[in-house]
Image (tube, helix red, strand yellow):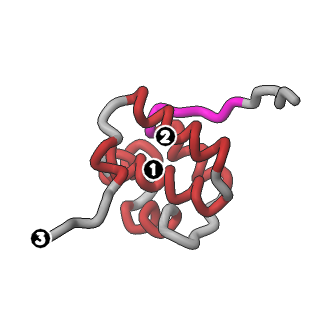
Amino acid sequence: MKTSKFEIADYLDNHEMIAEYLNTVLEEGNEAEIVTAIGQVAKAIGMTKIAEETGMSRPSLYKALSEGAKPQFATIMKVLKAVGGQLRVNPITT
């Protein structure tokens, strides 16, 4: 039996799924997991398209969203906008 590596990007095929995935990671993940998740969404949509919309080169985009990367906040905001997302602050209920 041959198995393949699970790729979440293969399942991020609509805006609702992408939003749910990013919101879950934003709520539960750490900084590295959030960067990885944004990278997975960019991969699902297409790095070439995201690169064009952000004005970044594909290699720069891959580097900024790779595991262990610490991209600038401006880069994260550009990519989120390009994937059709936005950050929003909600009050924490206790």
Give percent across and percent down for residue 14. 34, 31
Occupied quadrant, residue 4? bottom left
Q: Secondary structure at mark 2?
A: helix
Q: Which residues are magenta?
A: 83-88
Magenta part, dominant SS = loop
What residue sits right under mark 2 in the picture?
21
- Badge 3: how crowded within 10 Å, few (<14), some, or many (20+)? few
Residue type at mark 1: give it. Answer: Gly
Disc nearer the start of the sequence (2/3): 3
Q: Residue at 32% x, 57% y: name it.
A: 7
Occupied quadrant, residue 33? bottom right
Q: Nearer the viewer, residue 56 or 80?
A: 80
What residue sits right under mark 1 in the picture?
55
What residue sits right under mark 3 in the picture?
1
Q: Secondary structure at mark 1?
A: loop
Q: Is residue 53 above or below residue 72?
A: above
Disc nearer the start of the sequence (1/2): 2
Residue type at mark 3: give it. Answer: Met
Q: Which mark is residue 12?
A: none
**Image side of residue 65 versus residue 86, left or right:** left
Q: Is residue 9 above or below residue 83?
A: below
Q: What's the CA distance linking mark 1 and mark 2?
A: 25 Å
Membership of 18 in magenta stretch? no
Disc nearer the start of the sequence (3/1): 3
Which one is in front in this view, the residue at disc 2 or the one at disc 3? 3
Q: What's the CA distance linking mark 3 and mark 1?
A: 43 Å
Give percent across and percent down for residue 51. 39, 52
Occupied quadrant, residue 86? top right
Give percent across and percent down for residue 49. 32, 45
Residue type at mark 2: give it. Answer: Tyr
Which one is in front in this view, the residue at disc 3 or the one at disc 1? 3
Give percent across and percent down for residue 48. 30, 52
